[in-house]
Amino acid sequence: MAGPGSRVFISHLSGVAVFDPNGDQVGRVRDVVVSLRIGGRPPRVLGLVVEVIGRRRIFLPMTRVTSLESGQVLTTGVINMRRFEQRQSETLVLGELLDRTVTWSKNAQEVTVLDVAMVQTRLREWEISKVFVQVGRVGRLRKAKGETLTLDWKDVTGFSVTEEDQGAANLLATFDQLRPADLANVMHHLSSKRRAEVAAALDDERLADVLEELPEDDQVEIIGKLKDERAADILEAMDPDDAADLLSELPGEEAERLLQLMEPDEAEPVRRLLRYEENTAGGLMTTEPIVLEPDSTVAEALARVRVADNKPALAAQVFVCRPPNETPTGKYLGIVHFQRLLREPPYTLVGSLVDDDLDPLPPDTPLPLITSYLATYNIVAAPVVDEADHLVGAVTVDDVLDHLLPEDWREAALHGPADEREVTGGR
């Protein structure tokens, strides 16, 4: 992946091949999906429209893109093959922004958009930063000649949407910089109608992050108001343990319908989690810890730990197992803690650093014993291993805290009560 500050012109991505982690070609890029924001703020890049076999177009979130270099796009993880359907809050760059006549605010001069560039921020998100324009109007065949310029997004007007065009855009602009937990707290105090509007306008990844922080009643309400196809997309974007918790609150038939709509590879770990009792290691664990084979190096381990999407508790250690590396893994060998990785040369094999003194937890371990285990050994994530010595997941301290705190702990806002008037300026 190009690093923070790297600029990519969108037109250069058109037709570029997309490859999965195994090196097999998935399809080709046909467009880029962005979310326009009010107030002249740079649009956020949501993902790519990829044409796969049969001329079917699917959506590839930017969070699943690992590289945009060398004339190809590399992806990680499972790709959702559901047909792409553009939402009201989304804009296609190649299809809707290029060739548009806008205004250069410096001198109120009309310019024509020839291309736009996106850049990765320090938070590893992508946003549109530059607009490549030609002065004056250009016909459909682009025969007119004129000066070409590269302008900052903020120096061009005519793109920004109005509140009427984007529904809850004004409210979303207020929320844009909030952490998921803080946005969840605000949404909890909104009216049911307004909460549904905000949920509809959020992109899938953002809404999934927020749902994980909301009380169960709010989760059920929001997921119930979404179309089934989008609800399945949201569940796929959630951590499997959080998705399983949400589905366990739904009627059985509704939960099964949503599981059927999910991609099989995404639904399978959720189904496994639903088989365990709620307050046990199996019911609390995540199925996506960092797993490495014993012949992996410290350098490889640190690269996995540094991935921005890793939660802190999961990035505190790696679990060493025989292949396969997806849970349930091959034979579980032990843990290597992050601090140990920092003290060793990068070429050292993690198999030589394994801490195998700690007995892993069986899936049926009850919550009180899990709590004692984490406290006794001063660790933030515990391995969960089945009877065949396969690692099936890891229980993290944040999952344990969620179940130790009172059921209504989310109701108490850390910074005082918030309501719709406070965050929107409404009367």
Image: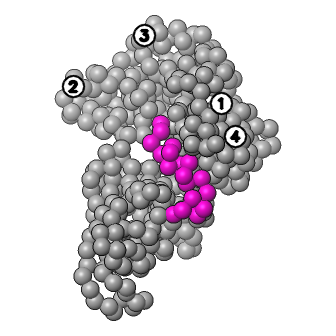
> SS for tag 2?
loop
Is 125 on the left-hand or right-hand side of 349? Answer: right
> SS for tag 3?
helix
Q: Which residue is mark 4?
A: 191
Q: CA distance from mark 4 to mark 1?
A: 15 Å
Do the residues bearing badges 3 and 4 touch, measured as CB atoms within 8 Å? no
Q: Which residue is mark 3?
A: 377
Q: CA distance from mark 2 to mark 3?
A: 22 Å
Front residue of 53/133: it is 133
The answer to which image quadrant residue 13 occupies is bottom left
Marks 1, 3: nearer the viewer: 1
Q: Position of residue 66 (x, y in %)?
A: 37, 52
Q: Residues within 10 Å of mark 4 (few under 14, many from 20)?
A: few
Q: Which mark is residue 344?
A: 2
Q: Which residue is mark 1?
A: 215
Span colored in magenta: 161-179
Q: Mark 2 or mark 3, which has the lower sequence index? A: 2
Q: What amino acid is found at the position of numbered circle 4 in the picture? A: Ser
Q: CA distance from mark 4 to mark 2?
A: 53 Å
Residue at (60% x, 22% y) in the render:
412
